Amino acid sequence: MSQRCRVVVLISGSGSNLQAILDHPNTDYEVVGVLSNKADAFGLIRAQKAGIATAVISHKDFTDRLSFDQAMIERIDAWQPDLVVLAGFMRILTEQFVDHYLGKLINIHPSLLPKYPGLDTHARAIAAGETEHGATVHFVTPELDAGPSIMQAVVPIAADDDTDTLQAKVHRGEHKIYPLAVQWIAQGRVVMQDSQTTLLDNLPISREQLRQNYD
Ligand code: GRF
């Protein structure tokens, strides 16, 4: 992309990943809008402090998912995004929404996908006796938490970890990989093609670099 990649971020809560994306030093992308489905999401304050346009569209104002998603599409498209980033956005999206942004819609999920899609990932990883856990940045496809993976942060699970300590570790990893993944997409280093993540051949990165260790 010759111009800076225009990024719209969708949130529902704290927005610590949004903050990491805002704080990342780069010249490849700019966050042009933040949309929340909750008026009290702290991430909206983070965005406003950074001088970024915000909008709230509450899912409660709509009788069905499709009309909610269509209202979001209208708002998001007015910001003319090159990339739409889900950062703790806690609504399930319709196939129509996902198809509208296919290839330019990414999410971060707090597990090493394909392990532990869905909720309560930290508790489930501990209960299963896993020795490592983490987070995955992936392209969004209509099937929940199943789109092609872009990057993972891996953290060790210590014997004395509980869901809070593990969640904090995973969060630290998320804050490192999510801005990096956004930057790589902004640079055109990584794209979704034929339902797979493709690293462009002429660029000096290997598949092994997609999985990085953080503690
Ligand atoms: C993160 O743990 C992310 O993996 C999940 O939602 C959480 C959002 O946290 N999708 P924050 O709002 O960015 O602090």
Image (spheres, rainbow, N blue to C red):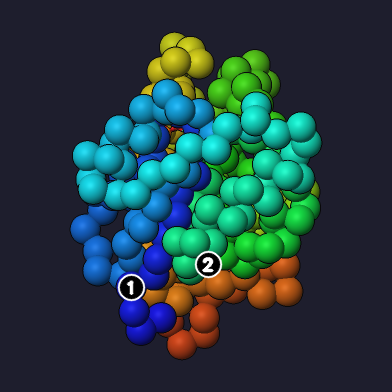
Instruction: Give residue 9's position: percent from left, percent from top.
Output: 45, 49
Instruction: Give residue 102's position: percent from left, percent from top.
Output: 66, 64
Identify which residue is drawn at 44% across, 15% down. Answer: 164
The one nearer the camera, 45 or 21, is 45
Report the amino acid beneath label 1.
Arg
Q: Is residue 167 above or below residue 33?
A: above
The one nearer the camera, 129 or 20, is 20
The one nearer the camera, 28 or 191, is 28
Numbered tag placed on residue 30 in the rendering: none
The reply to whether residue 169 is visible in this rendering is no
Identify which residue is drawn at 65% across, 27% down. Answer: 60
Q: Is residue 88 above or below residue 205?
A: above
Mark 1 neighbour class, 10 Å CA radius: few under 14, some 14 to 19, many 20 or more = some
Report the amino acid beneath label 2.
Arg
Identify which residue is drawn at 68% across, 63% down. Answer: 100
Mark 2 neighbour class, 10 Å CA radius: few under 14, some 14 to 19, many 20 or more = few
User: Which quadrant, please, contains the N terminus?
Assistant: bottom left
Instruction: Give residue 108's position: percent from left, percent from top.
Output: 53, 44
Q: Nearer the viewer, mark 1 or mark 2?
A: 1
Q: Between disc 1 and disc 2, whose residue precedes? A: 1
* Ligand 1 under 8 Å from disc 1 Cβ: no
Numbered tag placed on residue 207 in the rendering: 2
Residue corresponding to mark 1: 4
Identify which residue is drawn at 76% across, 45% down. Answer: 66
Instruction: Give residue 150's position: percent from left, percent from top.
Output: 54, 59
